[in-house]
Image: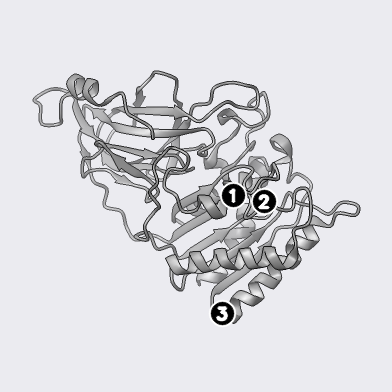
Amino acid sequence: MIKSKYILPLIFLFGCKNNQSESNFYPADDHVFIYSDNTVRSDGHVYFSWSNSGVEFNSDGKNLEIILADHSSGQSSSGKLMHGHYAVIIDGVVNQYFESAENKTSYKIELPEGDKHIEIRRINEPRVSTTEFIGIKTSGKINKSDVPEKVKIEVIGNSITSGYGNIPENTPCGFSPETQDFTKSYAFLVSKKLGASLNVYAWSGRGLVTNYDKSTSGNMTELYPHAVPHSGFKKKVGTEYQPDIVFIHLGTNDFAHSIPDKENWIKAYLSFIKRVNSRYPGTNILLLGGPTIKDRENFPAFSKLSEYLDEINEQAKIKNWKTSVLIIENFDDAGSGCDAHPDYKAHKRMAATIINKVNKILK
């Protein structure tokens, strides 16, 4: 388990928000902060690692000092130690980004004047790092945001969902936090267009049953719904967050090297849907396929995945589960990002297709 090194020094340095000083320190466990459901609280700090996980609040301050520690999960494709990147979203619009670094816990940002709703979101997946949020220092005040009722979405996926390589202009290309930006992924774009909240469980290279490296350990069936995977925390996310619709976007890695046995794979997928439906009774579940998977000579991966998903959808409806299926066919620039993943332009095209489908489901 991750052990914090930052508790006493920060409290000593910043004090608390009741001090009569120009700056107020709001610790992570203050009631003013609203967190994603897929987080863990420990020793007064809050940990999160899935894409789009983070914290939101209201503030009238012109500046913030964000106090967090970013615990690296390993190296990028180029061998560089990875640390997370974060988006600062103001009143629903991405305002700026910042990059964390080794042995650094203080990140200062300037903000527009006036009251505003602020979100600090991870734009990388757990494969990059785990965030230990410690608190915020500001010359202004922080208040709990009065969040209106929204459409609620949950997405379970792989590298396509997490935005792997969707900003390939940031070289070297390959897997790295520099080439991955969840705010430019189809899932984020769909949520913003629909004014929806969003919970995400997506990890590059992981399959429903078989991962891209042909292993089965640590697939999404095992990882879902762990709050902070591979950090030592064993907590699974509760069911307080009840989504109106869940996207399941798995299969690309299962079909990467061979066609899975039809009976067994469909059985595993239906079992996964049953778990989701048990967590969120009566919710809509959208089964997504494509767009980077394609048919090749003697290897009809796209056709078989489409066939399997259609049959899964039919069997799910017999069980009275509210499923739908959407197969996004491969298009010319679907693999224009790193390692043949969708780039931002392709994600926007995917988002438009999914939005049309979701509007029909939720109408």
Q: Nearer the viewer, mark 3 or mark 2?
A: 2
| Left or right, residue 335 beside residue 14 | right
- Estimate the spatial distance between the alpha carbons at disc 3 and disc 2, rounded to whole Å: 26 Å
Do the CB atoms of the residues marked 1 and 2 lie less than 8 Å apart?
Answer: yes
Residue 182 placement (x, y as % from top left): 53, 41
User: Is residue 56 among what the camera can see?
Assistant: yes
Query: According to the image, label 3 marks what residue?
Result: 319
- Residue at the extreme left of the image, as rendered: 20
User: Is residue 116 among what the camera can see?
Assistant: no
How many marks on residues?
3
- Estimate the spatial distance between the alpha carbons at disc 1 and disc 3, rounded to whole Å: 25 Å
The first of marks 1 and 2 along the sequence is 2
For the N terminus, the quadrant is: top left
The first of marks 3 and 2 along the sequence is 2
Residue 126 placement (x, y as % from top left): 50, 38
The amino acid pointed to by label 1 is: Asn
> Compared with residue 121, is residue 256 higher up or lower down, i.e. above or below?
below
Do the CB atoms of the residues marked 1 and 3 lie less than 8 Å apart?
Answer: no
**Secondary structure of residue under mark 2:** loop
At 20% from the left edge and 19% from the top edge, which residue is drawn?
13
Q: Quadrant of residue 60?
A: top left
> Compared with residue 72, is residue 54 higher up or lower down, i.e. above or below?
below
Pick whichever, 235 or 30, lies toward us.
235
At 66% from the left edge and 70% from the top edge, which residue is drawn?
312
Query: According to the image, label 1 marks what residue?
Result: 219
The first of marks 1 and 3 along the sequence is 1
**Secondary structure of residue under mark 1:** loop
Query: According to the image, label 2 marks what residue?
Result: 210
- Estimate the spatial distance between the alpha carbons at disc 1 and disc 2, rounded to whole Å: 7 Å
